[in-house]
Amino acid sequence: MKKIGNQTFQIKDDVFVRDTFTIAGKKEGEGPIGNCFDIIVDDDLWGEDSWEKCELKFQKEAAKSLMQKNNLMEKDIDLLIAGDLLNQITSSSFAARDLQLPYIGVYGACSTMALSMGLGALMIDGGFASNVICVTSSHFCSAERQYRLPLEMGGQRHMSAQWTVTGSSAVWLSNGGFGPKIKNVTFGKITDLGVKDANNMGAAMAPAAYDSLSQHIADTKIKYDLIVTGDLGTVGKSIVNKMFNEENNSIEDIYDDCGTIIFDLEKQDVHAGGSGCGCSATVFGGFLYKKLLNKEINKLLFTSTGALHSPTATLQGESIPGIAHCVGIEM
Amino acid sequence: MKKIGNQTFQIKDDVFVRDTFTIAGKKEGEGPIGNCFDIIVDDDLWGEDSWEKCELKFQKEAAKSLMQKNNLMEKDIDLLIAGDLLNQITSSSFAARDLQLPYIGVYGACSTMALSMGLGALMIDGGFASNVICVTSSHFCSAERQYRLPLEMGGQRHMSAQWTVTGSSAVWLSNGGFGPKIKNVTFGKITDLGVKDANNMGAAMAPAAYDSLSQHIADTKIKYDLIVTGDLGTVGKSIVNKMFNEENNSIEDIYDDCGTIIFDLEKQDVHAGGSGCGCSATVFGGFLYKKLLNKEINKLLFTSTGALHSPTATLQGESIPGIAHCVGIEM
């Protein structure tokens, strides 16, 4: 069994993160890591007639551009693993329609990039696939109108609310080549401490992040150079730090959150930070992957975090179940 | 590489379908295979205060009952793979909250049971998991109000419309024991011939079923005793038969559809047949699994079919992408 500790899968053979392609929106392009993205799209419709169609174009173009850049044909790719925030993950499924690859649709809310990369790594290490493409996306406008309020209303945002990242990243995993390798994968359990406020997703997801991170660290005993969570923002990040500190096991020196990396929290009026499937995806694909390639980081624990609620469940009085999936990557 | 032909993954080690537990609604219990289900729930709320909460109870009870029946503890299960039709797959995620197992959420619409079982089999054969639970559900009332019209309106149903199955099945896959074995898995590509009518899902999904079935058969060259699709109903089933007949490769003698097995189409007023994630799940878990155990079938090609649309996409003029995933099982 390729399992270590209670919950972590160990990758025995080589699974390389061979390349990434990242497309981001205007606001993301103006942020502190804006120069890391392959394409920045200034228009929130990108020539389409709805935000939802724009979002699927982000996914489709990210995956197609990644394939073109690396001369990959459809026949070279064994699996496409994709998901997004929209109902029935239509951005992913409609993009997959044009990509014509064997397709596994996943739903992990904002945890989707780590979930997809973890699954893809297992498929390669299990001997089933040579090449896998993982892709995910989010779009501020499509997410806001599905999860919260019509944008046209101009509602006041809570200070604990986060800004859904407009962006998509496609990641090519392969059993051959070079680059950083995926070494360990921990799929999370659901943690739900009863937070019901959809304007405070960081607090809803932080206990799940703590649970998966501490399980992964206990299982692997690896000293990481950098631990990042997906989109906890300032509120969730401080809760994670507090939970580790209370166990006398501080990670503060090596811990950051993609939601606080992607935007300038002082200047960009995003309140608690970035969120969405596109958040950890674009920060990994655009920023962290290059740091691994340049050996600025050698051991990265990439942990996307998801809030698995729905507007219907919230209206029915339910709290927000959180989840976090960890992917340990080493250069 | 454990790949045969273009698109099929071959399971080399033993992956047993060790047991199933199936819960069905009143109408399903009154149908021709009603005596195969472990529990029949007469009340469409099962003591809950919404159909959505009732559906998640179906999933939770199916998985818990399967574990209790087989003396399985949480620590014995390496992965829970689950999905359903509701927005943000809340039936699965809220059931997973109580099950406390490492959780992979998938979305394949009505193709979810074959998708989950296929993924679970690969996880076991890849050496990552010893025991996996796959679970999915649907509920007529929660599906109708999400995808179509309020039930209270009493709208007239189209003759090509299908009846969403109220039910859930949990399937235990294991690397040890006895029982039928999963041998080959084909994850489908999206096929979309432009059908836009959400009241004719069979026609939307049939070309995808034909594509995956013919790919699986070409890849494996296995002569199956029985081929079943998930929920094409009478309309889709006849299209699949026609497509194979046009290639002079008739499968009519060995082919059936779960949507036409679960209901008495003459007497139960379900029009074109059953549908939903619960359709192929309950027909497999309750009916086909027992036929395998009793050796009435030795080689089964279980193919769940999904229509990956959303009400939003339909309102925006999109057609319905179809997908089908094949799992070859042998006793």
Image (spheres, coloured by chain):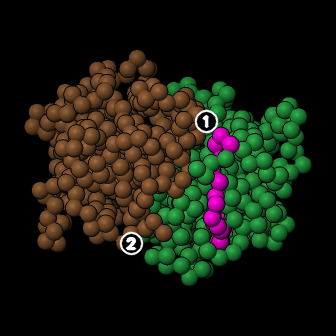
Chain colours: A green, B brown
| A92 part of magenta stretch | no
B84 sits left or right of A132 in the view: left
Dot label at residue A205: none
In terms of image quadrants, where is residue B34?
A: top left
Residue found at the far top of this picture? B47
The range drawn in magenta is: A5-24
Label 1's element?
Answer: loop
Q: Label 2 neighbourhood size at 10 Å, few (<14), some (14-19), many (20+)? A: few
Mark 2: amino acid: Asn
Q: Nearer the viewer, residue B265 or B292?
A: B292
Q: Nearer the viewer, residue A179 or A161?
A: A179
The answer to whether the residues at label 2 and label 1 have Cβ atoms under 8 Å apart is no
A166 sits left or right of B4 in the view: right
Residue at 23% across / 50% down in the picture? B298
Nearest to the eye among marks 2 and 1: give it: 2
Residue that label 2 marks: B6
In terms of image quadrants, where is residue B286?
A: top left
Residue that label 1 marks: A190
* Mark 2 to mark 1 CA distance (whole Å): 36 Å
**In the picture shown, does residue A268 fall above or below B162?**
below
Mark 1: amino acid: Ile
Where residue A79 appears, as percent x and y from the top left, is 49, 65
In terms of image quadrants, where is residue A67?
A: bottom right
Is there one chain holding both mark 2 and mark 1? no
Q: Give the number of callouts.
A: 2
Q: Report whether residue A70 is seen.
A: yes
**In the picture shown, does residue A310 fall above or below A52?**
above
Q: Nearer the viewer, residue B265 or A272?
A: B265
Where residue A275 appears, as percent x and y from the top left, is 68, 49
Residue at 81% across / 72% down in the picture? A294
| A17 part of magenta stretch | yes
